[in-house]
Amino acid sequence: MSCTSPVIVALDFSTVEDAINLAKQLDPTKCRVKIGKELFTVTGPKIVEELQKIGFEVFLDLKFHDIPNTTAMAVKVAASMGVWMVDIHCVGGLAMMQACRNVLDQMNSKTLLIGVTVLTSLGLEDLQQLSITKTPEQQVLSLAQLAAEARLDGLVSSAQEARALKLNFPQLKLVTPGIRPVGASKHDQQRIVTPAQAMLDGSDYLVIGRPITKAVNPPQALEDILISLQ
Ligand SMILES: O=c1ccn([C@@H]2O[C@H](COP(=O)(O)O)[C@@H](O)[C@H]2O)c(=O)[nH]1
């Protein structure tokens, strides 16, 4: 059965056992799962297969960023593993994003290609330290313009930028981490939004890690978030 829920649970774990143990508590019709750098580095591709075997659609969040050929070949391998979604950094540039789009088109792949704009852990001061004089929203919008030109399927941004992105790029799916239920710890995130507000503002997918995975009762934490969206 395919998943219609907007929630993507970030499985940020350091062992296959911990990741599978958490995934098995969740229902694949109520969320998708995301494999990030920590889990993939420790497990390699077998974790993708294991999660697919128990019914989950997988977002492989490795945020590829390299020269066009290297990035496109990495995206090709990810797509051949049957992942539902894969991401690349928009700051890799237009040619890099186009190379990734082309490789997926040549394969007739259905894997969604998503461009990371400005990480949700970054605020205005962090951008200034990087010699970026734009606000986070201005920087997100200018990277979104390039991603749209490269015909990406969507963007990773904070839900704080969702309204402006949906207005200007209605064709792009918005994947938004930095989601925090009211009262939850921010941890290392800066540009946070509640699940309900993110959906109201135009997010298509909510990436949620610690508020679910570190909860005393992870399936109940997911259920509470889904109820808050009704
Ligand atoms: O801008 C970004 C891009 C990716 N992420 C990833 O999302 C999750 C968020 O986890 P939380 O525990 O809910 O903070 C994590 O895997 C990040 O690598 C992001 O946070 N921001």
Image (cartoon, helix red, strand yellow):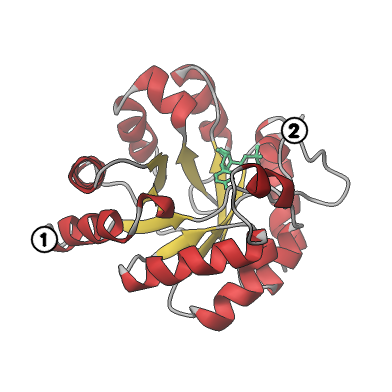
Q: Nearer the viewer, residue 129 or 43?
A: 129
Task: Give the distance between the C-alpha atoms of the residues marked 2 and 1, in whole angstroms.
Answer: 42 Å
Q: Where is residue 106 in the image (x, y as percent from the top left)?
A: 11, 60
Q: Residue furthest right?
A: 183
Report the image quarter containing ligand 1.
top right
Q: Is mark 2 on a helix, strand or loop?
A: loop
Question: What's the residue at 41%, 18% (across, down)?
Answer: 42
Residue 155 is left or right of residue 102, and the answer is right
What residue does disc 1 label?
106
Q: Where is residue 215 in the image (x, y as percent from the top left)?
A: 74, 33
What residue does disc 2 label?
215
Q: Is mark 1 on a helix, strand or loop?
A: helix
Q: Residue 32 carries which label?
A: none
Q: Position of residue 45 (x, y in %)?
A: 29, 28
Q: Along the polypeptide, which appears first: circle 2 or circle 1?
A: 1
Residue 87, above or below 138: above
Q: Which picture quadrant has residue 197?
A: bottom right
Question: What's the residue at 75%, 57% (across, down)?
Answer: 193
Q: Which amino acid does label 1 sit on?
A: Gln
Question: What's the residue at 74%, 33% (across, down)?
Answer: 217
Q: Nearer the viewer, residue 226 or 193?
A: 193
